[in-house]
Amino acid sequence: MRTVSLGLAALVFLAGCDGANPFAPDQSVTLDVSKIAAPTTVANGSPITVVLTVTLGACLSFDRIQVNRDASGAYVTVWGRDGAKGRTGVACPAILILEPHSYQFDPPFANSFAIQVDRGRLPPLQATVQVQ
């Protein structure tokens, strides 16, 4: 009976992991953003759409854009996965892909809106949009 209970407990635990292996290495990484394209000015009440050029390739893939913001600005981090992280014997192709990803900031904004993009070990990229 105890074996059945342990087996059921393990099954319930693994089902709660959304099919992911809880013992697999965390492959999350901050991706490099080579360029940020943002308008220099927008009308008051209009959204701001930026395009981030994300560097992918090898074993890197895009996952999501995380944003922390207030009325005067935003701090952006682009997350991805590194398929080789935490594994041995994984061969990654030597390719480089620059992939654009858009993000829209909705009002309200202060008179200017500063966007800072985290690039891991590299200095952040910055853009400022004037709101008129």
Image (cartoon, rainbow, N blue to C red):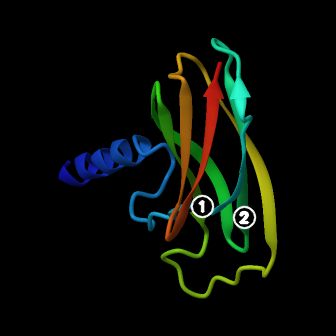
Crowd tier of the residue under label 2, counting other residues whose Cα lies within 10 Å: few below 14, some 14–19, many 20 or above: many
Residue 79 in the image: x percent, y percent?
56, 53
Look at label 2 and name its amino acid.
Answer: Leu
Residue 9 in the image: x percent, y percent?
28, 46
Q: Going 59% across and 76% down the picture, which residue do you hit?
A: 84
Check the picture and name the quadrant holding the C terminus: top right
First reached walking from the N terminus: tag 2 or tag 1: 1
Which one is nearer the viewer's eye here, 93 or 114? 114
Whether residues under marks 2 and 1 lie with C-beta atoms below 8 angstroms apart, the answer is yes
Q: Is residue 57 above or below residue 30?
A: below
| Disc 2, SS | strand
Which one is nearer the viewer's eye here, 87 or 77? 77
Quadrant hosting residue 32: bottom right
| Disc 1, SS | loop
Q: Which residue is mark 2?
A: 56
Q: Which residue is mark 1?
A: 31
Residue 76 in the image: x percent, y percent?
53, 45
Which one is nearer the viewer's eye here, 108 or 27? 108
Q: Going 24% across and 54% down the picture, which residue do you hit?
A: 3
Disc 2 from disc 1: Cα separation: 8 Å
Look at label 1 and name its amino acid.
Answer: Leu
**Left or right relative to 84: residue 24:** left
Q: Going 18% across and 51% down the picture, which residue do you hit?
A: 2
Q: Is residue 65 above or below residue 125?
A: above
Residue 100 in the image: x percent, y percent?
78, 49
Which one is nearer the viewer's eye here, 98 or 13? 98
Crowd tier of the residue under label 1, counting other residues whose Cα lies within 10 Å: few below 14, some 14–19, many 20 or above: many
The disc at residue 93 is none
**Left or right relative to 25: residue 98:** right
